[in-house]
Amino acid sequence: MGTGSSGSAAKRRRPRAPRVAVLRIGHRPGRDPRLSTHVALVARAFGAERMYLHPPDPHVAESVEGLAARWGGSFRVLPAPSWKEVVRSERGPVVHLTMYGTPLARVLPRLARARSVLLVVGGAKVPPAIYGAATYNVSVGSQPHSEVAAVAVALERLRGLPGTRGFPGARQRIVPTARGKTVARVGERSR
């Protein structure tokens, strides 16, 4: 009947962030494993659920799955023999991150309302067909930059900064320190 404080709290509540997957196209096995691994690590840390890798590279998938086993979470790198099939099967907006696109700030309100989003980043040679297949071609900046940076900025704007609490199932965690590096087993007390 009344408009108590619960109504104003609902207005202030941040809308639920969309579920996000990343599609890395143009991976060159043997030449790009480090860069593609970094795309996956950033995607995982910033809240994406999975990364599709085209063409598939089992070494990248194994490396990231080993990291997830230690640091927690359910993030996986999935093989994508056909990037077009991944794009076609996506139910939400397909967002091609490119320096040539519409500024992210203009598209962000529409993406924030979506249930799921597929972020697409290319390699050295992006297939021209992705520009037509994407729902949005989006730039995070109009200067040359890496796909790792594009994924980080887009995910931060969509989902916020990653927390410091860690992921479910983690066997180890980082202990924030002013100097040095401290890693502890989960359940161990900080010194």
Image (cartoon, helix red, strand yellow):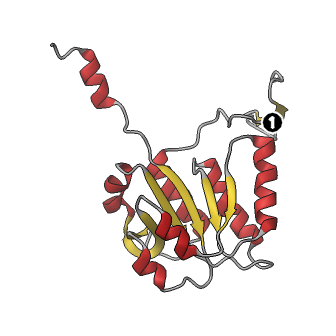
* Residue 115 image offset from top left, x and y in percent: 41, 49
- Tag 1's secondary structure? strand
Report the residue at 69% width, 62% height from top.
38
In the picture, measured across the screen, residue 134 lies left or right of residue 120, that is left
Residue at horizontal 81 percent and vertical 58 percent from the top: 63
Q: Residues within 10 Å of mark 1 (few under 14, many from 20)?
A: some
Residue 34: give x, y in percent of width and height: 76, 68
Q: How many marks?
A: 1
Residue 37 placement, left or right of 89: right
- Farthest residue toward the left? 1
The disc labelled 1 sits on which kind of residue?
A: Gln
Residue situated in front as seen by the camera: 75 or 121: 75
- The N terminus, quarter of image: top left
Residue displayed at 72% across by 63% down: 37
Residue 106 sits in quarter: bottom left
Q: Position of residue 54 (x, y in %)?
A: 65, 73
- Residue bearing the label numbered 1: 172
Q: Is residue 153 left or right of residue 74?
A: left
Can residue 140 be seen from the camera position used here? no
Residue 161 against residue 150 in the figure, above or below: above
* Residue 106 visible: yes
